Structure formats: C-alpha cells, structure tokens
Image (cartoon, rainbow, N blue to C red):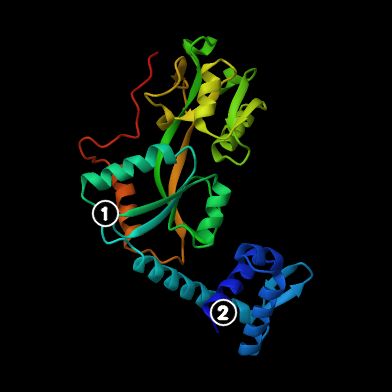
Amino acid sequence: MEIYQLRYFLAVAETGNFTKAAQRSFISQPSLSQQILNLEEEFGQKLFHRLGRKAVLTDAGEMLLDGAQRIISEVDHTIGELKSDPVLGPRVAVGAIPTVAPFFLPAVLAYCRANNIHISLQTQEDFRGPLVDALLDGKLDWALLALPLSEPRLHIEKLYSEPLWLAVSAAHRLATADRITFEELRHEDFILLGETSTLASQIERYCGEHHFEPRITHRCGQLATVKTLAAMGLGVSVLPQSARSATDPEGLVFRKFTGITPSRDIALVRHRRHHLGQGAALFAEAARAVVGPVKIAGLPTLTPPSPAS
C-alpha cells in the first residue's frame, strides 16, 4: 500500500465519483481506477460499490476511511513542518471569504508582529464553496467563513458577530434619512457580490423576510467594485461594518439600520481530522485574541468609527 493510493481512495470517497476523483488528483480515470483495484486486491475486499457513475463505500471502505484520513493528515502535517522556514516560522494555510480577508487577516498579522509571533502565512481568498472544498481536501488549515454552515466533517468555532450597514451614495435619499429599515429598500436597485457569496445570500434572505425580492442590477466580484458603484449612485448595498475604510470612494455613505440591526457571524473553521501544526495553532490563538475583549495598543480594530447621522 502506497500513500498516493490512499490519496486516490480518499478522493473517490469524498467525491463519490471516479472521474471527479481523477480530475481532482490530476491523473487519468483509468489510472486511478487501477490503483483502487490494486488496493482492493491487497486487502482482499471491495472498497466501493460501483453504482453506475456513483461510487459508495462498502463496509470495508468505511473501515479504511478513518485510518486513511489520519495517515494522510499526519503525512501532510509532517511535510509542512519540514518545509517550515526557520526564520519566517511554521507554515499555516488560511482561507477567508472576500468580505473578511481584507480586514481580518491584516489585524491578525499586526497582532503577531506586535507579540513577536512568527508564522509563515499562506492565504486563499475565495467564496465559501471553494474554501470548504479546500478544507475537506486538506489544502487549508483554517478558513474564516460566515455562518450558518452545515458540514459534519468541519469543526466550527464562532469568532465574532458584526452588524450590517447600508452603503449608499451621499446623494441618495436614504443618506440623510432619520429612519432606515429593510422595508425602505423595497424599490431600490441592489449592488451585491456574486451568487456564491454568503453575504449576498444573507441580504437576499433578509429581503425575503421583509416580503420582497431585491432587484439586483449589479453583481460584483470584489467589495471595492460594490463600493464604487454604490458611491456613483447606481444602487444600494448592504455591507459588514468592518468593510468601512478610510480609503472608500468619495461620496460613499454608511448608515446604520433603525431598530433590530441585521448582523452576521464569522467563524474559524477547520477539518475535524486535520492535524493542526504549530503554525495553525499560533494563528488560531492570534485570531481569538484579535476579537477578544483585550487588544494591544496600536492593533488595527475591526470596528470602524460610528457614521454620522
């Protein structure tokens, strides 16, 4: 039995399909299938039920799954530790959604520098789906994701909550309104992130709770584009409080909602069976400290100043 065979086995187990597993493993499907057959011959038992295009673990496959995950996790951890730069510190791979990465990751790095914590940080900024896949594939140690998230293979630790604010042009009627509720947005054009964005989905859900469907005129790939279009008066958006910045486009106004303020929860997420090396442990400690009640002087804060009324 070889390590690469276990990786192929896990790829089939996690995708439920030999073709997808081969694509993920960057080998041909016949080659991957042959390696699975070699494993089955070595164990003297079938590992998968071949149900057309679907591959389902047999009882023997279920028994192998747990051990294979532990072995691959330990191997990857050891390789990562061996490759750690003695000057930069132990490696840690972290993913974050686009509405978190530009604000939270710099704060964690600032905390590490202020406390003489050395880690070699590798980052991946992406929407939730690809980040969850990367966690399950063992390519990331941690991911910063918005809740809710339902995946039994992942350990989820809520880090913080933050309010969502209205982002509009200074010339918009709501820029100086005394009262702002989601109901006020019923007839507005919306500027949102892409359809796979958890923030966009949350905003659409809030609109639904107020009995209307948002009229989405612009879908953007980056927060900077959302802000620019909103500042130009091409629609309204709803953004997390931490997205407000001193470098925002001229004419962009952030306003709090009246009454019950919509909010979102951000969590630190990892694979339950993924071994956490020293770098991953240090990053998690820093992330918790950044959002904790005590912050080091000079550390960038996640909370921007209150907007003018």
Would you name the residue on which mark 1 appears?
118
Coordinates of residue 32 in the picture (x, y in percent): 66, 74
- Quarter-of-image position of residue 54: bottom right
The quarter of the image holding the N terminus is bottom right
Query: What amino acid is labelled 2 in the image?
Result: Leu
Disc 1 element:
loop
Residue occupying image coordinates x 60% and y 72%? 8
Coordinates of residue 67 in the picture (x, y in percent): 50, 77
C-alpha distance separating marks 1 and 2:
37 Å
At label 2, counting other C-alpha atoms closer than 10 Å, the crowd grade (few under 14, some 14-19, many 20 or more) is some
Disc 2 element:
helix
Q: Mark yes or no: residue 292 visible.
A: no
Coordinates of residue 82 in the picture (x, y in percent): 35, 69
Left or right, residue 237 beside residue 286: right
- In front of the other: 16 or 87: 87
Coordinates of residue 166 in the picture (x, y in percent): 50, 23
Residue 160 to residue 91: above or below: above
Number of labelled discs? 2
The mark found on residue 64 in the picture is: 2
